Image: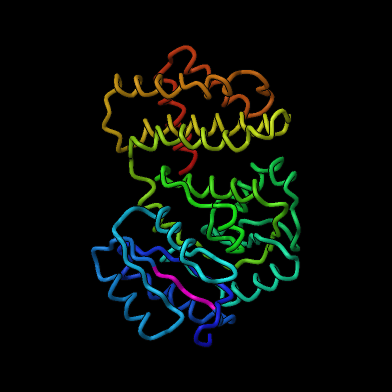
Amino acid sequence: MRKNERPLVSIVMPIYNGEFVIQNTINQWKNQTLSNFELILIDDGSTDNSLLLCNKNEKEDSRIKVVHKKNSGVSSTRNLGIEIANGEYLVFSDQDDNVKSTLLEDNYNYAEKYEVNVVKFGSVYRTIKTIDSPNELIIQKNELFKKYLTFKKQGILANCWNGFYRTSFLHNNKILFDTDLKFGGDDQIFNLNLINKSDKILVNPNIYYYWNVEADQHHSTKFNVGRIYEMYQLFQKQYSILSSKLPDEDIEEIIKELAFLNWQRGIQELFHVDCSLVKKDKIKILREISDSRLYRQWISFKGINLLNKKGIYRFVFITAYKLNFFNLFAFIFYVKKKKCK
């Protein structure tokens, strides 16, 4: 990239205590076939040698920009990256993941060819390909909402690092990460805001990004009582976006599904192996969460299909709450845990 030339792409990479992993990821971005980019390394108050490594890379490569700030979490760190990005397009990267060398070039060409603000590309979670499609396809806004749960399950609308975004589109629509959400829901709200402001997105099924799930699990699987309450907070934010599409039967079903899934995940946290709460406190939290206005409105027996396993599971789960069968919850999650092994 020539001096004073605007980069085609900004890569935003939050850094936190990653001294043993960041160099590998930095090297893979430096080796991209599209060379006109800026790599923004934002150190989020690391207490190890991460900042020293970032500064070393900045001195060696003029395309690298280092920012240091007090620790405030990944959402605010990504938001800072969006704010200072100079590239025509923007991508996100975690500090310990792997990327294909043609990620920037291929997706830049797709964005220009189809004149879209958002390209979502294939990634790998463990060994699972997240996008199941043989060819690139344009998805219109109406379909994005109606099939939101499907696209979320496929990974298309589940994360931020599998996307290639026009920077001006993010700036003009004030699309940022929700700093209230600390346990992963920020990506979901980011994606919902994306499709809410987009007329269409392009899906590129080719795989470019390889997520290091083991590193993420180290942080996300520990018990935290805050996660229980945040699942309801996440649903409130999902509902605030989706409710604008009502009345629509498809959207109603999506809201019902999200209500149940967030409610269930919040309750599941009470039965985490590291949860030290006594039974009385667990029941108190369970009732407090379950009696929340939106959960009462959207979680019910209505529409449950008892002819399939999913419907039966949901019926038993709701029954356990309605009848105060607290021990049944413990049994349900014990069975689920055994099946996952």
Q: Which residues are magenta?
A: 37-41
Location of residue 283 in the rendering, given as x and y in whole percent from the top left corner: 35, 20
* Magenta-drawn stretch, dominant element (helix, strand or loop): strand
Question: Is residue 68 depicted above or below 156 in this figure?
Answer: below
Q: Residue at x 39, y 21 (%)?
A: 288
Location of residue 35 in the rendering, given as x and y in whole percent from the top left corner: 55, 82
Q: Which quadrant does the C terminus fall into?
A: top left
Q: Is residue 254 magenta?
A: no
Q: Residue at x 59, y 75 (%)?
A: 8
How many labels were placed on the picture? 0
Location of residue 331 in the rendering, given as x and y in whole percent from the top left corner: 43, 26
* Residue at the far top in the pictured view: 323
Please name whichever residue, 123 or 75, is drawn nearer the observer in this view of the structure: 75
Question: Is residue 48 depicted above or below 171 in this figure?
Answer: below
- From the viewer's perspective, is 126 left or right of 132? left
Q: Residue at x 42, y 84 (%)?
A: 61
